[in-house]
Amino acid sequence: MRLYIIRHGEPDYATDSLTENGKKQAAALADRLCAHGLDEIFSSPLGRAIETAEPTCERLKLSYKIEEWLSENKVFDELSAVDENGERDWSFGCQNTKLIKDDYTKDNWYTNPIFKTCASPLECYKRMAKSSDNFLERLGYKRSGNIYEIQTRSEKKIAAFCHHGVGTIWLSHLLNIPPHIFWSSFDIHHTAVTIVEFKNNPDDLTAAKCICFADISHI
C-alpha cells in the first residue's frame, strides 16, 4: 500500500478557503495525482483541504471521505504557543536550533521551554498517534510497537489531504522520528506530496518507508 499525505494549497485562513494561487496549485496537483492513479481519497473537514482535494476527486471520479482527526484546529489549540509579540503561533515554528540545542529525546521533547505555554503538547501527539493507528488498522495495517502487522494485504494508493501541523506530527509517528527532530529538520510546502510505502513482506510485518518527501515538482 502507498499512502499519499498531501498539504492543502495556499490558503486564505480567514475564510478557510484557497486563494486564486492555491486553486492553481490544486489543479496542477490533480494533473500529477491522476498520472499516479488513486484508489481512495480522504480529507480533513476544513475547507482549504477539501478545496485542494476536489479537482483530483473530479478528475478521478472519486468521492473524498472526511476524517475528522485530520483537522488542524484542535492540533493548533494544543500545540500553539505565545510568541514574543504576545500572539499565538505554532510552537515548533521557532528557530529550529531551539528544538535541538539541548539533549532532548523522544521521551521528554515536550519539556523543552518552547512548549511551556502550549495547552497540551504530549497529549496532542498521543492523540494523533492513536488516530493514525486506528486509520491504518482500518486499511489493514495494525501498529505493533514501531512496525505494522499486515492484516489485509493491499496494493491500494490512498491519499489524505490535510495540513502542515497535522502532517508533521503524523509523519513523525509513522516514520518513528521524534517530533522535535522532525520539526527541526523537515518542512512541508503548500500541495507538497509525501509518499509512504507499506511493503507487503512475506512475514506479514511491515514498516512505513518514506519514498518521496514534500515534493512540489507539479508547481
Image: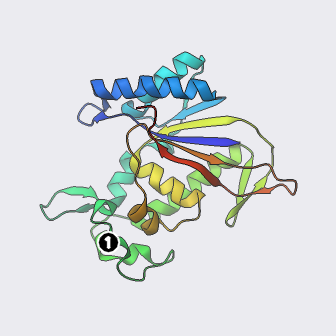
> Residue lying farthest left?
85
Which residue corresponds to the image point at 44% horizontal and 34% vertical from the top-left? Answer: 45
Colour scheme of the picture: rainbow
In front here: 92 or 134?
92
Measured as percent of width and height from the top left, residue 80 is found at 30, 58
The residue tagged 1 is: 97
Q: In the rendering, at what x and y percent does residue 83 appear?
A: 19, 63
Q: Where 166 sits versus 29, above or below?
A: below
- Measured along the vertical axis of the image, is residue 18 above or below residue 70? above
Q: Residue at x 47, y 56 (%)?
A: 169
Residue 95 against residue 159 in the figure, above or below: below
Asked where in the image residue 49 lies, by quadrant, the reply is: top left
Is residue 150 rendered to the left or right of residue 58? right
Q: Which of these two is toward me, 171 or 43?
A: 171
Q: Quadrant of the C terminus?
A: top left
As drawn, which residue projects farthest toward the right? 202
Q: Residue at x 56, y 60 (%)?
A: 173
Identify the secondary structure beneath mark 1: helix
Which residue is drawn at the image coordinates 40% and 48% (left, top)? 164
Residue 74 rendering spot, x and y as whole percentages: 38, 50
* Residue found farthest to the front: 217
Quadrant of the rendered structure where residue 101 is? bottom left
With 101 as the anchor, is 28 left or right in this view?
right
Q: Amino acid at mark 1?
A: Thr
x, y percent for residue 58: 52, 16
Decide which of 76, 147 is in the foreground and name it.
147
How many numbered circles does the render carry?
Answer: 1
Q: Quadrant of the N terminus?
A: top right
Q: Label 1: how many residues lie within 10 Å, few (<14), some (14-19) or many (20+)?
A: few
